[in-house]
Amino acid sequence: MQYTLKKSLGQHFLHDENMCRKVVEQVNRKDGMQLLEIGPGGGAITKYLLDWGNVHYKAIEIDKEKIDFLNKTYPSIQDKIIHQDILKATIPFEGKFSVIGNFPYNISSPIMFKVLEWENSVDEVIGMFQKEVGVRIASGPGSKLYGILSVLTQAFFKVDYLFDVHENCFTPPPKVKSGVLRFTNTGNPFQIEDKKKFIQLVKAAFNQRRKTLRNALRGTLMPDALQHELMSQRAEQLSVSEFVLLHKTFQCAEKF
């Protein structure tokens, strides 16, 4: 049984077996762990994950044709695939689980926002991204690459850019280089209780990143908050802990 590649779904399938094994080996594998694969596609890394004993595996795939292909090609995947859009999916496990995936590049950022929504339950993420996006996520303050996802992911996860993946490892080869990242849950070290408000603050700050925070956050924070010393800086200059300070000092006491 064959399948077609769908550009509308951003499908670039990994075919280099050495790279497939290298990606899978990054998972912090534990007996009895729960593991979600996002977008298994043609099963490039799926076949290795299915061989693991004592791992509770599930996959989320939006493309019915790929689901039919996987069910026929890998009988052990029967009843383990959720036919759903990951961005609309409900949490797939009770308790803690890890995530792995060659994420469609056109929705890789929204996928990470979904992971943040599930952050209390996600131990680890091993994800393939467009290299440019991966480098941005892993960047620190003071860099023009540092942005919304950098702050939000690093507030809840330790982010490691692991290695590059050459475009020739894919079918069809994408026009960009790729990279694999690991996100390790750090247990909400900043004790952020209102994640939605924190996300609102960070997005507002970076949506006008050329402006000082005093101007960018006007309308998001009350006027007296805009007098804080940090407000003379731009979003890219603030560390994660400084964003948390603004959130806890001003947002948590306000009513929206």
Image: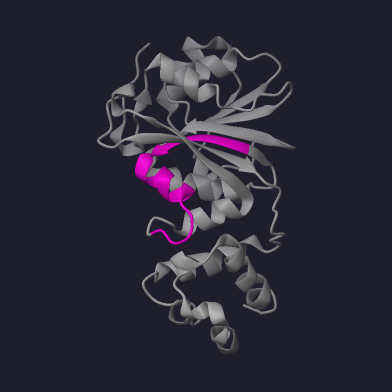
Q: Residue 228's spot in the image, x, y percent?
A: 57, 83
Q: Residue 16's spot in the image, x, y percent?
A: 37, 17
Q: In this view, does 1 lie to the left or right of 30?
A: left
Q: Is residue 238 left or right of residue 195?
A: left
Query: How many numbered marks, from 0 up?
Result: 0
Residue 188 appears in view = yes
Residue 94 vs 252, above or below: the answer is above
Residue 43 appears in view = no
Residue 143 vs 168, above or below: the answer is below
- Quadrant for the N terminus in the image: top left
- What residue appears at the point 35 percent right and 45 percent down from the top-left corner? 132
The one nearer the camera, 184 or 53, is 184
Q: What stretch is highlighted in magenta?
A: 124-143
Hey, which quadrant is residue 123 in on the image? top right
- What residue appears at the point 49 percent right and 31 percent down from the top-left corner? 101
Residue 56 vs 141, above or below: the answer is above
Task: Identify the image's colour scheme: rainbow, by chain, secondary structure or one colour.
Answer: one colour
Q: Residue 247's spot in the image, x, y percent?
A: 62, 71
Q: Residue 139's spot in the image, x, y percent?
A: 46, 51
- Quadrant for the C terminus in the image: bottom right
- What residue appears at the point 56 percent right and 88 percent down from the top-left corner? 223
The one nearer the camera, 158 or 77, is 158
- What residue appears at the point 70 percent right and 78 percent down from the top-left corner? 253
- For residue 127: magenta? yes
- For residue 225: magenta? no
Name, please, the residue furthest toward the front.
Answer: 142
Residue 216 vs 22, above or below: the answer is below
